[in-house]
Image (cartoon, rainbow, N blue to C red):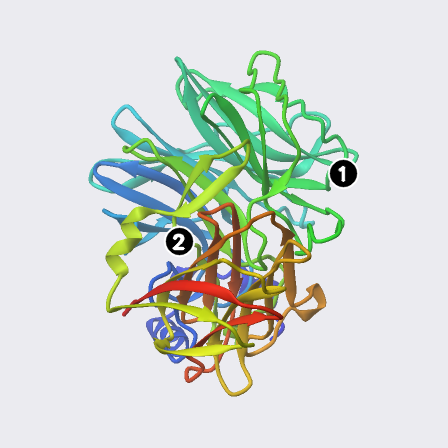
């Protein structure tokens, strides 16, 4: 379907009740609706925004276009949870109806201040010649969950030397000052992040560009996030325009991090190591983190990518968010593990210990459409070993370790309905390991795979038939000892 400009920028209050009901009906007829991931009620979901803890609840907002699986007029949609597992749809949080966000309430973040939750976001606007002019804006949520937008932006001008690609503020507090980094593009069309400071979340001063070693690294850095962990500074961002390099940077756009010294806000210097992808799979972008009351740094990401057509499009919706992941540092590398609260989803349990000595083995009780699975392979002399998920007559998703090549591989060539094949159907990364532990969450149309307690992570959307529920373990050219446990998720 070809969407016109008028359709893409239609406001929700311009739709009739019958149209909304018809949209919902189409979405709910989709065979790939998720069971335990955050997903849109209709239309398109993208970047997680405003991830925070306020008044006893986790709050997670996301970009939302209500009318279909395209990037049109963006709202902020609000979900909340007491446990990071069971999420309640609250509804629209920020509606784009002012001069400073007339063409969309774009991404941003949240911070508690003076007993309220301040939401800082980019207001997208277009003039009559369709030129973009971004504003950085504030909306405030009080303890009754009422959200009020400020009547004017807090940052109205793009700094000299940068283009209109200036968006996605991430805010934090250090000492008596608030800081925000904003994704930007220099006038020479290279990506970077800019630093602002404020004493009160309302009056913002441009400090300048953060100095990194990546002067020529893509044409735009989206959704930056800075935080400190274990006396280190971490900068997460999503660069666009990175060329493939071996097994790396295979997706249309990337998301990754750099670990370094703490950011010197006075000199704007960030001394850092190399850029590393956060997720080695197919569908991961624009992650955002928050610090929770337990002192954990928790990440949520968009399980999707821009400019990709997905099989759910035909049902009027697209995308979901990843499960919340706790971030820690191990040997100067970010490690991601599913938050412990997800154990609440566990239903019927089945376990097995055996030796896999053949190309593939079916084990009684190991099957399902939605489940959590932990499988450890030890004492292996096989050339490669792994698991086939969502197996059907002609369908399977493969995660395996190629021991001789020291490569972890995710293969969705036969995962079901095909899409985005021009970007490839296999993802790999290098991994040195004697033992391999797969911790896997399978939902109706996704897999999230945590390798060796989060040392590497693979995320992918898959679209198999409902009857494709098999699980097969395999070892080739040798054998492997397998210990596995599976929990059904209703």
Q: Nearer the viewer, mark 1 or mark 2?
A: 2
Above or below residue 445? Residue 141 is above
**Residue located beneath label 2 in the image:** 323
The percent coordinates of residue 384 (x first, y second) are 60, 65
| Mark number displayed over residue 53 | none
Q: Residue furthest bottom?
A: 393
Could you say which is closer to the camera, residue 259 or residue 307? 259
Could you say which is closer to the camera, residue 156 or residue 67? 67
Left or right: 211, with 201 as reference point: right
The percent coordinates of residue 177 (x first, y second) are 43, 16
Q: Quadrant of residue 418?
A: bottom right
The percent coordinates of residue 448 (x first, y second) are 46, 59
Above or below residue 110? Residue 398 is below
Quadrant for the C terminus in the image: bottom left
Label 2 secondary element: loop
Kindly tell me whether residue 44 is visible in this rendering.
Answer: no
Kindly tell me whether residue 450 is visible in this rendering.
Answer: yes
Could you say which is closer to the camera, residue 225 or residue 2? 225
The percent coordinates of residue 387 (x first, y second) are 50, 68
Labelled pair 1, 2 in contact (Cβ < 8 Å): no
Could you say which is closer to the camera, residue 204 or residue 295? 295
**Residue located beneath label 1 in the image:** 189
Quadrant for the N terminus in the image: bottom right
How packed is label 2: few (under 14 Cα within 10 Å), some, or many (20 or more)? many
Identify which residue is drawn at 25% across, 27% down.
Answer: 115
Indicate which disc, 1 or 2, sits on the residue closer to the N terminus: 1
Identify which residue is drawn at 57% across, 11% down.
Answer: 266
């Amino acid at each position: 379907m070809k969407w016109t400009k008028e359709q893409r920028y239609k406001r929700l209050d311009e739709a009739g009740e019958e149209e909304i009901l018809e949209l919902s009906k189409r979405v709910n007829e989709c065979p790939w609706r998720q069971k335990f991931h955050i997903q849109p009620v209709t239309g398109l979901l993208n970047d997680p925004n405003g991830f925070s803890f306020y008044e006893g609840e986790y709050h997670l907002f996301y970009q939302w276009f209500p009318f279909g699986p395209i990037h049109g007029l963006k709202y902020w949609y609000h979900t909340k949870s007491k446990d990071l597992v069971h999420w309640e749809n609250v509804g629209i949080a920020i509606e784009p109806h002012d001069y400073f966000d007339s063409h969309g309430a774009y991404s941003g973040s949240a911070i508690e201040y003076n007993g309220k939750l301040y939401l800082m976001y980019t207001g997208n606007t277009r003039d009559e010649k369709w030129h973009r002019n971004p504003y950085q804006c504030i909306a405030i949520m009080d303890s009754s969950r009422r959200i009020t937008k400020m009547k004017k932006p807090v940052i109205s001008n793009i700094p000299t030397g940068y283009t209109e690609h200036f968006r996605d503020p991430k805010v934090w507090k250090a000492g008596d000052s608030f800081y925000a980094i904003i994704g930007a593009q220099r006038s020479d069309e290279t990506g970077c992040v800019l630093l602002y400071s404020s004493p009160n979340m309302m009056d913002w001063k441009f400090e300048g560009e953060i100095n990194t070693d990546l002067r020529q690294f893509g044409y735009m850095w989206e959704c930056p996030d800075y935080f400190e962990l274990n006396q280190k500074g971490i900068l997460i961002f999503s660069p666009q325009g990175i060329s493939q390099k071996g097994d790396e940077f295979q997706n249309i756009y990337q998301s990754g991090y750099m670990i370094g010294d703490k950011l010197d806000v006075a000199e704007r210097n960030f001394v850092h190591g190399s850029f590393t992808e956060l997720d080695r799979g197919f569908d991961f972008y624009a992650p955002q983190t928050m610090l929770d009351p337990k002192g954990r740094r928790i990440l949520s990401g968009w399980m999707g990518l821009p400019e990709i057509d997905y099989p759910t499009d035909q049902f009027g919706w697209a995308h979901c968010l990843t499960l919340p992941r706790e971030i820690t540092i191990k040997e100067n590398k970010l490690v991601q593990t599913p938050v412990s609260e997800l154990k609440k989803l566990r239903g019927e349990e089945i376990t097995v210990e055996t030796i896999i000595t053949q190309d593939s083995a079916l084990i009684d009780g190991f099957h399902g459409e939605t489940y959590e699975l932990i499988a450890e392979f030890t004492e292996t002399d096989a050339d490669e070993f792994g698991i086939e998920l969502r197996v059907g007559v002609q369908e399977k998703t493969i995660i395996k370790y190629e021991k001789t090549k020291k490569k972890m591989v995710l293969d969705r060539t036969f995962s079901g309905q095909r899409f985005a094949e021009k970007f490839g159907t296999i993802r790999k990364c290098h991994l040195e390991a004697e033992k391999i532990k797969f911790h896997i969450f399978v939902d109706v149309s996704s897999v999230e795979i945590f390798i060796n307690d989060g040392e590497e992570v693979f995320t992918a959307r898959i679209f198999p038939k409902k009857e494709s529920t098999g699980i097969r373990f395999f070892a080739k050219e040798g054998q492997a000892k397998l210990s596995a446990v599976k929990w059904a998720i209703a």
